[in-house]
Image (spheres, rainbow, N blue to C red):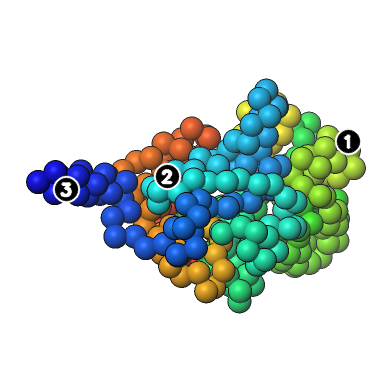
Amino acid sequence: MRSTSIAAVVGVLLAATGVQGAELPEAIKKAGELKLTVSSTYAPMEYRDPATNELVGLDIDLGTEIGKRLGLKVVWSETKFAEIIPALQTKRADFVISGISDRLSRRETADFVDYLKTGPQFFLLAESPVQAAIDLCGKKVGTTRSTIYPQDIERWSKANCETAGKPAVQFTPGENAVDVRNQLKQGRIDAAVQGSETLPYAQQQEPGKYRVVGEPIGSGYQGIMFRKEDTVLRDAVFEALGAMITDGIYKTILTKWGIPGNAIEKPMINAAAQ
């Protein structure tokens, strides 16, 4: 009688967290933890809170909640963005949730559970004389070198500047989002590109400092990245994320970080078209 009662309680708890029936790889079940690595320079997705030095952000909240629903402790570590994919491939990370875009070029060795709308966006200093995106032809535009944004800038330049008979955008590489914004403030570049999900936070932190110009120059999704062979873990996370969307905690987290408009209606696997 007592064991039946306990089983019923466990069933209710599993249903409430949305992971009833979810399977996990044996090694992860045995360890009781998820190893997740982020690049902590991409606020509000993941960054060190300057007041507390704690690792915080939208991805941190989502990853922690996913771990909770799978009954696993999340152990976070940090690395440069350029080392994020190698960390996954060498199994230093069980999966990646760190502001990384789902792209066709990355799917030869990885799968994505897409969880957030995104798009590369031009922005500049508020006092810049540039009024339209086309005015950036021939100008210096910076972005993080290890992202897919340099290719987005080149693609946009060919489709707009070249077509209009104007000089191409001059790409200037940066180490990370903080470095790129510093280059902008120092006058070393004329404009910059970041994911649209990060700009409301940057504008809030430095009121009146930045303004966006034009529409996003692309569209897609940020994804939770898995090794191709890790379908069991991928599907467990997909299920947990779906439950978070259904019960509202997903939208609560996005609202907390100021980007509810980037929400998706349901998780998707490998949904980005580019």
Residue wearing tag 2 = 68
Q: Residues within 10 Å of mark 1 (few under 14, many from 20)?
A: few
Say what amino acid the circle numbered 3 marks.
Ser
Q: Is residue 231 left or right of residue 109?
A: left
Separation (CA) of disc 1 from disc 3: 67 Å
Residue wearing tag 3 = 3
Q: Is residue 147 left or right of residue 245?
A: right
Percent x, y for residue 167? 86, 61
Q: Residue at x 88, y 35 (%)?
A: 186
Q: Residue at x 63, y 36 (%)?
A: 55
Separation (CA) of disc 1 from disc 2: 43 Å
Q: Residue at x 45, y 65 (%)?
A: 25
Name the residue furthest bottom: 108
Question: Mark 1 and 2 residues: CB-CB less than 8 Å, in contact?
Answer: no
Percent x, y for residue 240? 38, 53
Say what amino acid the circle numbered 1 marks.
Gln
What element does badge 1 sit on? loop
